[in-house]
Image (cartoon, rainbow, N blue to C red):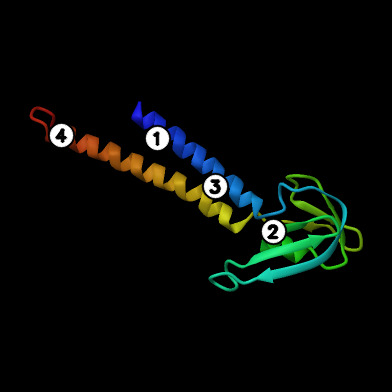
Amino acid sequence: MVVVTLAIIAALLWGAAIMITFTRTIVPQSFAAETIMDVSVHEEHQPGRDDAIFVRTDRRTLRVDPSAAACLRRGDTVSKEAWSMTVRRSDAPDCQLEPPLQLAAVAGVPILITVLTGGCLMLGRRISRQLQPGGG
């Protein structure tokens, strides 16, 4: 029962981490003819690697990832459907967003750890059975 409870908690935390990662992108956002007023970069602990990039439109301010920042220029009027990877610009070709780089780590590392841990537990169980009298 403890293992099931821990697995449920881990799955919930994993899902929350993925959603938090998406909040730092414009992927879940929708735009309806919003004009980009400003794109600003705020350096964080590792300049150039973990910078916070903010886009201010005529309606709101959003934190975006570098892929989105490359698509959005001051003065552009943009439209985008929620969860779409395509940004439509009025005066330029459409721009394709890339999946957030952090998503690979947030989604992949827990899966890798789970597989490795499960493999180690199965191997340990197999070895302990072989070491028991009459188990070999």
User: Which residue is located at x 73 percent, y 57 percent?
Assistant: 62
The kind of residue tagged 3 is Ala
Residues at discs 4 and 3 in contact (Cβ within 8 Å): no
Label 4, label 2: how many angstroms apart (C-alpha)? Answer: 55 Å
Residue nearest the observer in this picture, 74 or 113: 74
Label 1, label 4: how many angstroms apart (C-alpha)? Answer: 29 Å
The residue furthest bottom is 47
User: Which residue is located at x 55 percent, y 41 percent?
Assistant: 15
Classed neighbour count for the residue bearing mark 3: other residues with Cα under 10 Å, few (<14), some (14–19), many (≥20): some
Secondary structure category for the residue under label 3: helix
Q: Which residue is mark 3?
A: 17
The kind of residue tagged 4 is Gln
Q: Nearer the viewer, mark 4 or mark 2?
A: 2
Residue nearest the observer in this picture, 93 or 29: 29
Classed neighbour count for the residue bearing mark 2: other residues with Cα under 10 Å, few (<14), some (14–19), many (≥20): some
Q: Nearer the viewer, mark 1 or mark 4?
A: 1
The kind of residue tagged 2 is Arg
Q: Quadrant of residue 122?
A: top left
Q: Quadrant of residue 121?
A: top left
Residue 73 x, y percent position in the rendering: 81, 67
User: Which residue is located at x 29 percent, y 43 percent?
Assistant: 120
Label 3, label 2: how many angstroms apart (C-alpha)? Answer: 16 Å
Q: Which residue is mark 2?
A: 63
Residue 134 x, y percent position in the rendering: 9, 27
Instruction: Tell me which label, 4 or 3, sits earlier in the chain.
Output: 3
The kind of residue tagged 1 is Leu
Label 4, label 3: how many angstroms apart (C-alpha)? Answer: 40 Å
Locate the C terminus by quadrant: top left
Q: Which residue is mark 1?
A: 6
